[in-house]
Amino acid sequence: MIRHFYRDDWDLRRPEPVEFEARNGAERRRARMAAATLCGMSDQGRPPYQQPPTQQPYPQQTSPYSQQAPAGAPTQGPYAYAPYAYPYAAPRRSGWFWAAIFAAIVAVVVITFAVMFGRMFAAMATAGGSSTTFGQPSIGVIDITGVIVDADKINKQLERFGNDDGIKAIVLHIDSPGGGAAASQEVYHEVLRVRNDLHKQVVASVESVGASGAYYIASGCDRIYANPASVVGSIGVIMEWTNYGDLLRWAKLKNVNLHKGELKDAGDPTRDMTPQEQAYFQGLIDNMYGQFVRDVAAGRHTSADKIQPLATGQVWTGEQAQPLGLIDAQGGFRAALLDTAKRVGLKGEPRIVRPPKEQRGLMGLLTGDETTDLFTNPTNLLNQAPGFYFLWK
């Protein structure tokens, strides 16, 4: 075996390689001594012994596990014995400690499941309505709140109650300013289907606001109830989008648009509309407006000529709307509920059935149901198309 060493001269100017070849024990010992000497060590093959400082900034702790020097071992000089300490062994935990940790984990799991089941049964309490009929005659209640942007959820609830023989009637509890034109119209036609094909009474009860698209849906019901101070009406269509062309010019950005077709880029939010584009969009709005008026007239069992003067986009209170024929009776949700129960032959306090509520919380995040609420889809930022709404503002 060949070993290479680098010799460091006393003047520390440059290293020189020195090669040693060890063939027997004596030569190996001489090679080790020479290597130690060339590496700056003393002639004895060990670093010179350094005397410890007279005072130490921190007192040195003597471990009870320190090994004593063997008999005859030198205590001073270059070959002095260097004592060492064994690592400190921490005391072992008792079995009761781990038993307590396990009991705490079990308790957390039990409490978590108890809270989950408690919330589920609380949602089924009579105050909020059950989520199933259990074979008993009941009144189904569907809440329509906020801006209407998706018809699928409401339509599924209508279909479920319509196919349930235990549900004798459906009450739409409305508190909405309307929403998307197509979504509102889709729910309106589903209400008509449940009434005509499944032969279920559908009643609308307006709480605070039942305007535009929400009133569109209510007009398809058998009866409309509203509080005297409720706001109803707003029959009309609105189209809107945001023009951010000035912002792009301020940021020195330019929108690049390639298209084929004169009106393909109509409604481009980076520029103003041309007169031709304005006439084009106005034609779409007029057509939707005509559909709105005709459907309301059909649902209210009247003519479009009688609804047309009321279709100015304005709203009325419940007290004003009843003489105009926009609602059937004044009263809150309970009045609508009791009256509907009598009409379908239910005596006493009617049993309420509501669709099961969506579970929100940690389980929703783990199953992916809540991530859409917490994190916006980046593709939605690109959706800048003009919107048509049956919406009261």
Image (cartoon, grey):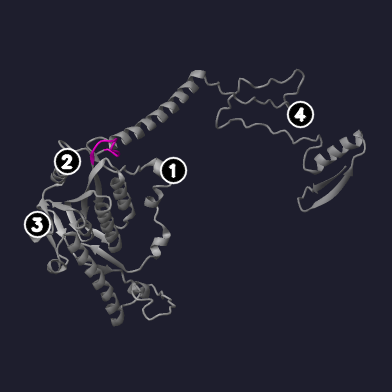
| Residue position for label 2 | 345
| Residue position for label 1 | 366
Of badges 1 and 4, nearer the viewer stands 1
Q: Quadrant of residue 149?
A: bottom left
Is disc 4 in contact with disc 2, using a CB cutoff of under 8 Å? no
| Residue position for label 4 | 79
Disc 1 marks a residue whose amino acid type is Leu
Residue 159: give x, y in percent of width and height: 31, 49
Disc 3 marks a residue whose amino acid type is Gln
Secondary structure of residue under mark 1: helix
Where are the magenta residues, as a range? 130-138
In three-dimensional space, the C-alpha distance between marks 1 and 2, rounded to whole angstroms, equals 45 Å
**In terms of sequence position, does the residue under pointer 4 or pointer 2 come before the other?**
4
Disc 2 marks a residue whose amino acid type is Gly
Question: Can I make out residue 147 in this image?
Answer: no
Q: Quadrant of residue 108?
A: top left
Is disc 1 in contact with disc 2, using a CB cutoff of under 8 Å? no
In three-dimensional space, the C-alpha distance between marks 3 and 4, rounded to whole angstroms, equals 111 Å
- Decide: is 197 above or below 117: below
Residue 199: give x, y in percent of width and height: 24, 50
Kindly identify the residue that appears in the image at 28 percent across and 47 percent down.
162
| Residue position for label 3 | 322
Q: Quick check: is 393 in the magenta stretch?
A: no
Secondary structure of residue under mark 4: loop
Left-right relation of 207 to 72? left
Disc 4 marks a residue whose amino acid type is Tyr
In three-dimensional space, the C-alpha distance between marks 1 and 3, rounded to whole angstroms, equals 49 Å
In three-dimensional space, the C-alpha distance between marks 4 and 2, rounded to whole angstroms, equals 109 Å
